[in-house]
Amino acid sequence: MSEFNLSEEQKEFQKLARDFSVRELAPKAAHFDESAAAPLDVLVKAFEAGLTNVMAPQQAGGLSLPFFEAALIQEELSAGCSAIAGYVEASAIAILPLIFENNSEKIKKFVQPLMERLAFAGFAESMLDTTSNEAHLPVVKEAGADFELTGHVRVVAGDQADWFVLKARDAAGGTSIFVVDKQAAAVKPGKTVNRLGRKCLATVDFDLSGLKLPGDHLIGTVGGAAAIMSFVMPRAYLFFAASAIGISRAALAHSISYAKERKTFGRPIGDHQAVAFMMSDMAKDIEAAKLLTYKGCQLVDQSENDFESALQAKVFAQEAAMRIATDAVQIFGGYGYSREYPVEKLMRDAKTYQVTGGTSQKQLAEIGRNTLADSVR
């Protein structure tokens, strides 16, 4: 498969993440899926290896890596376990608004602590779902130089996050982005969502009734969410695409190994045309997903926040991951439906991406509308 003309530095980061994923994530994926416990021992090692919060600005003690490198790392980690890698993914998305604003004081206050010890940030699911009704967002009102939030949010990586970002609406209908300290007295954790896949990546409900926020917890300006999200959304979508590619690659790798060792009628099942065709479809879809995603990564690193390219990459990669993981279960036959084998977990994990940041159907409709609009210009 093509390497998309990666630079030597990009290949080094890719190899670092791949080796770590093979050594630390893949062997423990089943355990943390079964227990749904936070994978803290693995995350500590990821932090020590320099694989967390890699886009954090240098002024916060970070590497300030380009987005493409961050997405390559995310893909490799997700190939080992997308649930464990989900903490890296969530924190990367959460710091994007602060990277966009580029306020040195806020970066020092919120991002720098993430570089000094194992720590993560999270994001409210509703912030990234452009198809959701904004009436469901928390409500914010100004209280002098400060703000007051009221509402409920569901936060990805909410169990381990020091803080999280959310979008809130004001009485005039404008929307703003805020940082919320999870330890604030008015932040009351509720249930942890029992999800089908990515089980060790805890998504937690929070009640924010009467939460007082200092003025410096506002990112950007009051009512300025749209400008921030135009920067955040393409990158978030490309992170999701990279993670989905990781799942697809793992499903294909398991399918190849099984197809070589499992025999019927005295021959490996991979010699049978039906199985070989399934794996060839997997391989071509992975390659197509990579090309779409890498193109999007290049664009955002060139400051071209091409929402359409990122959306296409996300939808294609997540749909491909679901097909590929489902076909992997089929190749394994009855064993594939058993938790003794890894592919059923991959199928459950892949499903997460079809409903994250907006469902595939709604986003396909959005791509269709944009395509029709472009055709009449």
Image (cartoon, rainbow, N blue to C red):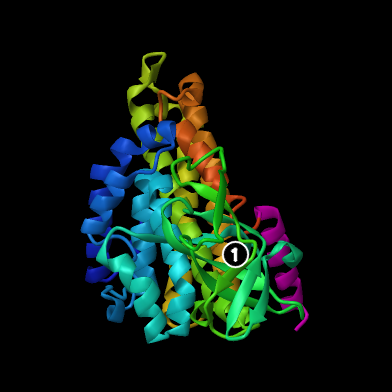
Q: Quadrant of residue 48?
A: bottom left
Looking at the image, residue 182 lies above or below residue 277: below
Q: Residue furthest top?
A: 265
Residue shown at 52% from the left, 29% from the top: 330
Q: Which residues are magenta?
A: 359-377
Within 10 Å of disc 1 (Cα), the crowding (few <14, some 14-19, many 20+) is many
Query: Which of the image's four quarters has the N terminus?
Result: bottom left
Does the magenta portion include 366? yes
Q: Is residue 18 visible?
A: no
Residue shown at 33% from the left, 66% from the top: 114
Looking at the image, residue 267 lies above or below residue 53: above
Q: Which residue is mark 1?
A: 128
Looking at the rendered structure, the secondary structure element under dot 1 is: helix
For this view, does 305 lie left or right of residue 360?
left
Question: The residue under label 1 is which amino acid type?
Answer: Leu
Does the magenta portion include 40? no
Looking at the image, residue 77 lies above or below residue 343: below
Query: Which of the image's four quarters has the C terminus?
Result: bottom right
Q: Position of residue 186 (x, y in %)?
A: 56, 61
Looking at the image, residue 29 lies above or below residue 223: above
